[in-house]
Image (cartoon, rainbow, N blue to C red):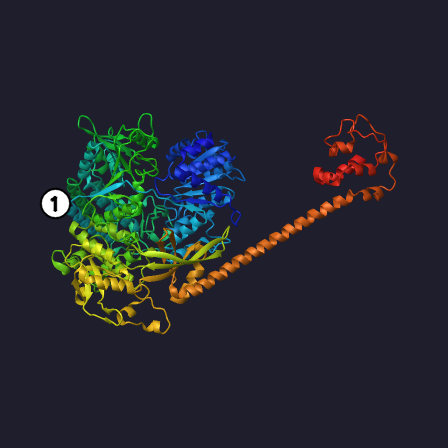
Amino acid sequence: AFGISLIISQTPLQFYHKDIVNSQHEVILQNNQRAGFLIGDGAGVGKGRTVAGIILENYLKGRKKALWFSVSNDLKYDAERDLQDIGAPNIQVHALNKIKYGDTATSEGVLFATYSALIGESQAGGQLRTRLKQILDWCEPGFDGVIIFDECHKAKNATSTKMGKAVLDLQNKLPSARVVYASATGASEPKNMIYMSRLGIWGEGTPFRTFDDFLHAIEKRGVGAMEIVAMDMKVSGMYIARQLSFSGVSFRIEEISLDEDFKLVYNKAAKLWAEALVEFMEAADELCMSSTKSLWGQFWSSHQRFFKYLCIAAKVRCLVELAKKELEAGKCVVIGLQSTGEARTREVLDENDGHLDRFVSAAEGVFQSLVLKHFPSEKQMREKGAGNKRKRKPRGRQPKQPRHGTYVAGVINISDDSSTESDVLDSDSNSSPDSVQDNNDDVIFVDQTTIDLRFYPSLARLEEKKQGLLNKIAELGKELPLNTLDELIDKFGGPEQVSEMTGRKGRVVRRPDGSVQYESRAEQSHTIDQINIKEKDRFMNGEKLVAIISEAASSGISLQADRRVKNQRRRVHMTLELPWSADRAIQQFGRTHRSNQVTAPEYIFLISELAGERRFASIVAKRLESLGALTHGDRRATESRDLSKYNFENKYGTKALDKTTKAILGQIESKVPPPQDYPGGDAMFFRDMKHGMKDVGMLCSQSRLGISTEKDCNISKFLNRILGLEVHKQNSLFQYFTDNFDYLIEKDKKEGKYDMGILDLAPGNDQIYEETQEKFLTAGNPQDGQVILYKISVDRGMPWLEALQKAQTLSNPDEGFYLSHKVITKMLRGNYPCVLLAVQGQERNMIIYKPNIGKQAQTESLENLQHKYRKVTPEEARDSWENQFTFSFRKCSHANWNGRCKKVDEGQECLMGTRLRQYHMLCGALLRVWKRVSDVVADITSSSILQIVRLKTKDSSKQVGIKIPENCISKVRQELVRMDAEVKQRRREKEQQAQEQRQAEEQQRLMAQRQLQDFFTPNLFTTLQPPNLPSLPTPYVSFPSFPSIKNPLEEILDLTLPNSSSSSQVSTQADLGVDNLSRQADPTILLHKTGGSLVFALFSSRV
């Protein structure tokens, strides 16, 4: 029944997946550990069901125990559902957090635990017990069952975190276990793969001896290296990664214009934060706390959260209006949030002794909490110091004095290298060493008795500043928006109408009489841990039609229009806040777009005009479109297929930020002009940006150096900090930064330095033909692989009809066909000027198409184009286009322009401008030859970066591999031939060793057989008397027969013939000597029947 249910309940993809995993688990690596497998499927494909299938397969084969690690204890219910779905409800799932330490009573089933549980410890009963030891004891020695590391990217940083080390330790202590890693982002970052020790990518018998060698090799070789790793893992059968098509999914972008009232509030808030920064710095300076890391860490994290809340709140009204329209249309709504704002609500609750009669503004609470708890003051420092660890200070040194020659009450500044507490105490101090606390922040606290009354005015002034800030925040708070989550629930009709799936414990709700109160999310029959699961069920059953999920609580939750649930309305997934990464956004959308759905969801991006949100929405839209989704009215998606261009957290983002800040400071002359529409012109822009970046802490004043960039200034910090600028300033600064970013990428592309990741070798409608292929063996672990060197021909020309069709779609007067002013006379072909087709690109740049090369890589400015060419009609352009298209099939541009080519005349090959280009491409198990090939290429070209390319040939076969430069092909081929010979030689040696071993075994078998045959030969038996038995007594030679008793030798060897009668089975001979025995027993029959027991049987019968 199990097997039948498995086949019915799993899709062919999931079933095929399981078979590949089982095959990989039969491989033993050279370190004697069983090979593992990585499932890298995207969200919604069905990793959980595939994992359940693997567990069931092993259960049916007698491996009754399995370990399943995931990110949340709540996902245990999903694990049980997956096992139920594939027809294995009898496999029990035991939650480790419900089992006592040391208890290993459960005999079989799945032990479900979180990664954090791996490092759990208990001191109960005076004995240290750990969860890791409990798990190992439960598995027992020799465990060969399944270990599932679900969402395994959570175990990253394995060498630097206790959790990561525990994951590695578990794998090392269970070498025979069948390990499966499951994560949609498992192979996206090489540094996150350190815990995947069972893949066999590094270690003995691989190109990389250690993980550090692997990491260095991959990170050194550019963007495309991880694609090579992923492809090699797929070729080797250890990795599979599928992504659900977004076919049927639709999406649209809703632009929300900020009204003037909101802009006014936003700008007020930005100015108040700038003022707060000045007040904090002055207070910290007065108390010698200016270098306190924890203080500024609190300040800037609060700054970031405040403006994030403000950005989200700006969209609430519009979202509610859109959602209600979708509900009226018969759909249901899922709203995605990043955070809940619960911390502020609980603070207000504590301040009011557990009572709350109003909705709380999360933004106001963040600001207020910062000033109350962290504004530099004697009281705040004393409270903070009470919890700090003591450190011993060296004797013989005197403390430094606070600035202006004054002691601050309760505070004495010391240097970082002090190590004994006595240094901080003056000789006449009444303090004891126990009163000294140190927090590594250059400030220590002593007993109140050291306070000098002369410094009370200074403390009083700081308290006045603090109170003044709190008053201004309270005034601003009257205009700030309310908590987004509570406001949304209220506007949709309260908790009775909304399924909330977040991590918070309580919420503020409006009662039927209009009053407001705080209530716990827990229900009478459900704990907080269970409430998210219950809320999900209510949404899926159709009891509630609006769901709100936070990113933290939504991991693994399925909210699609599943065929198995009652609520099959189309999901409308609205997002209030887009993450910086397009791929992270896709992960969020995976909650509502999953396998087994009746209808595909609809996505709505709500974007405001703040900090480049429009640009990020376009990136995500382009990503969805590339996965098969349908666009609705979005004209802003960029033309580029390379999404990495818009990932700012790379070397171009860092360089662009550096150039942006230096240009604003006037340290360099900018090659990128400021935004043209900035009020007051360029000078005003640079002045305002300098002040603005100081207001958000991106620039700092130094007495000797003037204004300089803050240390540790990075892209993430920049993107978060600029939210603290006034609306028009942040948009202008972000625009200036992205212009610099684009300029640097374009510059590197022109110079051939841009690493474009995987590049389409022949984009568009190019005709591609595979000419030759050479196969080479590669050494591998645990088995050898293969690489193939292809020679590819690409016809990149653009026929006249295709050019004419494109021209007919153009509307701009500057677009169309152009002929060169200079007419070149060809002796054989007449007068044909150069011809091209120009299409409008970005700004005033034109995209150029030519008959011989199709689309030109570089754009051309309109001014330069009009200087060299004149615009003509299609009729005028046709003859030149067709002539150049035909002539350039195998002839270079020099021959086209001049009638002959100097290089060709000298017997060399010239490919400049030819339609037909030839490329060499290496495909297959590339990771195993990466170092060899890159070393050869680096020796010739002085660059170790290998360009990864993909193409689709005319016969529809797809290839992805490394493009080998033309001048390197000979040396690369030699290296591949050498490697192939090494592998074949190693194979021959192994085969020879195996043959010799087989021959030795065969000789031993034949020798044993001859010895046995010699022993039972008749001549031997008639003439041979054993030397150790020279005079056998008569009973040993002959004895009377026993008619009713079987001969002992016959009874042991069962030598009776099949057709003999019962009487013939008993010997009637009076003399049963050895001669007679030997004649009755065929040695071959004896050998066949008894094997190694032959001699023993013989002598037993004689005795």
Q: 10 Å neighbourhood of mark 1: few (<14), some, or many (≥20)?
A: few
> In this rendering, would 233 be left or right of 985?
left
Residue 899: give x, y in percent of width and height.
Answer: 28, 71
875 relative to 565, above or below? below
Can I make out residue 703 in this image? no
Residue 298: give x, y in percent of width and height.
Answer: 27, 47
Residue 257: give x, y in percent of width and height.
Answer: 15, 45
Residue 49: give x, y in percent of width and height.
Answer: 40, 36
Q: Nearer the viewer, residue 963 or 748?
A: 963
Circle 1: residue type? Glu
> In this rendering, would 902 be left or right of 25?
left
Can I make out residue 794 in this image? yes
Identity of the residue drawn at 47% across and 64% down? 974
Dot 1 falls on a residue whose secondary structure is: helix
Q: Nearer the viewer, residue 540 or 1089?
A: 1089
The quarter of the rendered structure image containing the C terminus is: top right
Q: Nearer the viewer, residue 948 or 169?
A: 948
Residue on which disc 1 sits:
260
Indicate the quadrant where residue 816 lies: bottom left
Count of marks, rendered view: 1
> In this rendering, would 786 be left or right of 426?
right
